[in-house]
Image (cartoon, helix red, strand yellow):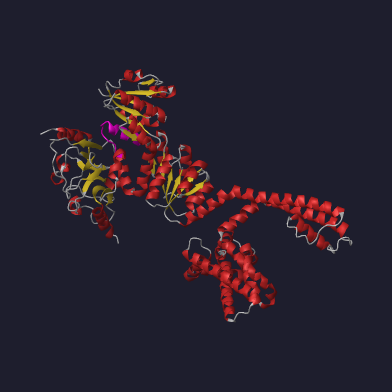
Amino acid sequence: MKKVVIFGYTKSGKEIAKLLKDGDFELEIIDEDPMQVADANIDGYFARHTTLDDDKIFEDIGIGDNVDALFCTSNNDSLNLFVTLSARNIDKNLKILTEIKKMEDEKKMILAGANRTISPHSVGAAKAYRMINKPRVSRVLDIFSKIENKISIIELEVRKGSLYDGKNFKNINLSSSNDLILLGLLDIKRSNEFIFFSRGVSHKIRPGDTMVVLGSKKNLKKFKIEVDTIK
Amino acid sequence: MLARLIISFAYFLDSNKIYKKVKGFVYDLLDNPRSSMKSYFDVLIIGLVLLTVAIFIYDISNHLPYQFGLIEDFAVSVFIFEWIGRFWTSANIRLLIIRYHKKMLELDQEPKLSKILKIIIKQKIRYILSPMAIIDLLAILPVYRPFRVLRIFLIFRLFKFFRYTKSLNSFFKVLSDKKFEFEFLFILGVFTVFLSSTIMYTFEGVGNNPHINSYMDAIYWSIITISTVGYGDITPVTMMGKIVTAFLVGGGFMILVLATSIVTNALSQKIDIIKENKLLAEAHKLTRLIVIIGFGRMGQILAEDLHKDQKRFIVVDINKENIAKAGHQGYLHMQADASNYAIINSLVFENNVEKVIVLTENDALNLSILLTIKAQEKNLDVIVRANSYNNIKKFKIAKADHVIFPYETVAEVAVEYIGNSVKFDAIDNILIQESDFTIDGIDILEGSSFIGSCIDDLGLDDLNITTIAILKNGNIRNFIFNPDHDEYEFEANDTLIVVGKVEYINKIGNEIRRQFA
């Protein structure tokens, strides 16, 4: 089983833990503040206290062994940096996502070895900006997030040789065959641009593209198997 | 009888459209700070004042041809029109009379003429006695021949500038805040002048000093000395006079220093407020203003984005450091406590505000601001930041249009990163990028001819618009995903959620709305 470690049971850490609770992950929380550790324990997570003065703690947790992803969400920037750097030192392939407070810190964290950084402030600001700029789309997305348990959204990477590799938009009709709706493609590797699906557009799916699909969880699961099937 | 006549005349005026239109026009021209006409009129007045004063000064030693008198006449007629117009629009007497009449009707009493006249006179007298109206009048009066002596008052026309220069007004307002200090200073000055001139007169006025022939000379000497000007035309000659002078020079110096420090102090205390008032006045002129309350990190990033987009917004924060940052960036800003009703009132309700975004880190404060706004303006769009998950619900109960809980989105992005199924909030980033395509809702309005027809009839397929879902009767709970194209029949108030090209989606929406045109 994959293991996920959250460093810092803060507001963000708490929300991540909440989302991962029901997933197929072994979750472990570490924090240098005993109060936060106690909080995490009360909320029903396995949490341990650490002062981080010894690299041994990382081995104890399982970094470099069975830990798949590390989230550095402590409120202390320099501690986040320290943990990111130390963990990267041990495991080159670990997925590390680090929270930053200031956008200026992004480069620093990436240099330290984080795969990705995220700032709650810019996330919140971007959201407010969208609500101001595109109120109608925001409204629709609002509706979707309210009916979230009925339909779900999924990103599927199309691998080389998949049934969908090389298929043209014109020849795809998921709505009748799978009761799913293909919103579009995310061209992560090239431009990170999102291409909306429309039969009016001639666009060929290439390996590495990510399909963004909407539908019930059951249908999505079936479809995932279909996409992952190699010819 | 006369009372009834006045009242019915008030009602007549109130129902007369032309009267209201003319009065509105005059108000726009003279007093409405939001009207564009006013600024042209202001420029005209300032030009006339400068011109007539210049003519007046030149005319003292040179004789100008009579044509210049015409300019004076024209200027005076404009000034008279201005004064009368302001006198007219200064209060809506008809409304007051109608209100009085209503009250009397409720009390079942006869309206009294004396009371009505009192209403009229009180309002108009108040205008006539206002400082600005007096200045305006002074600019006109010297033209009247019997008042020719008052020609020098023409120069008072320059005071008319006060009406147009806000900064000067606020400067005097600042000084008036220090009334007590100035009063003290004035009394001190008068006392010192009186004392020293009396002593001087006693010792030197009896023939010792050829320059001091009257008490007035002594007072003149005292004032010239105390102000540290010291012309030297009158100098003390006796020993006692010299001692008094020495004390007077010291005292005068003290008074001068005191006066300077009072003014500087008052200015430095109030300069921020003056600047802020200026900014507020600027905000007042804008339409579709966005108000950002809380200029922490999130507010700063948002402001940056909006600034790039050339949106008009004003930033409010109680923290001096934060607001200084807004000032450096050149944003409209105001340092104020947004939980204060008066602030919200002058900022939100009195301006043309499109949206309010509340982004402070204090949920209690956010909630109080939200409720203050929603209590008065239900339909104003308010976006609120929640700092704790438990408070999201409270904001929704308080009718926030959107609640932003950034930490949840952070978590969603994080979880997406390790490859789980994705939540909508995490994906909206990509869906909202600039593109010809969009996700939108199409409302099947009640009474539309499309009710009873199906998706294919609407021509969505031809325009390559994909229908994701239908919210039956606009209800989120009644939700059909991926509806059947030729089986589902539209009902009134259904909302279709569709993906497609923006222009095509708008086209369909317009087609539905056109039926009601």
Image spot of residue B35 (x, y percent): 48, 63
Magenta region, mostly helix, strand or loop?
Answer: helix
Report how many numbered discs are placed on residues in the image: 0
Task: State yes or no: residue B208 in magenta.
Answer: no
Residue drawn at (36%, 26%), measured in percent from left and top? A83
Closer-to-camera residue (B501/A106):
A106
Q: Quadrant of the N terminus of chain B?
A: bottom right
Closer-to-camera residue (A85/A76):
A85
Q: Quadrant of the C terminus of chain B?
A: bottom left
Query: Does the image show residue B515?
Result: no
Image spot of residue B207 (x, y percent): 89, 62
Image spot of residue B223 (x, y percent): 76, 58
Query: Does the image show residue B3?
Result: yes
Query: Residue at the bottom extreme?
Result: B66
Closer-to-camera residue (B509/B43):
B43
In this rendering, would B75 be left or right of A178?
right
The quarter of the picture where residue B166 lies is: bottom right
Image spot of residue A11 (x, y percent): 40, 31
In this rendering, would B191 be left or right of B101?
right
- In the rendered view, would you say B43 is above or below A226? below
- In the rendered view, would you say B44 is above or below B415? below
- The region drawn magenta spans B408-424
Task: State yes or no: residue B415 in magenta.
Answer: yes
In this rendering, would B284 be left or right of B232?
left
Closer-to-camera residue (B228/A96):
B228
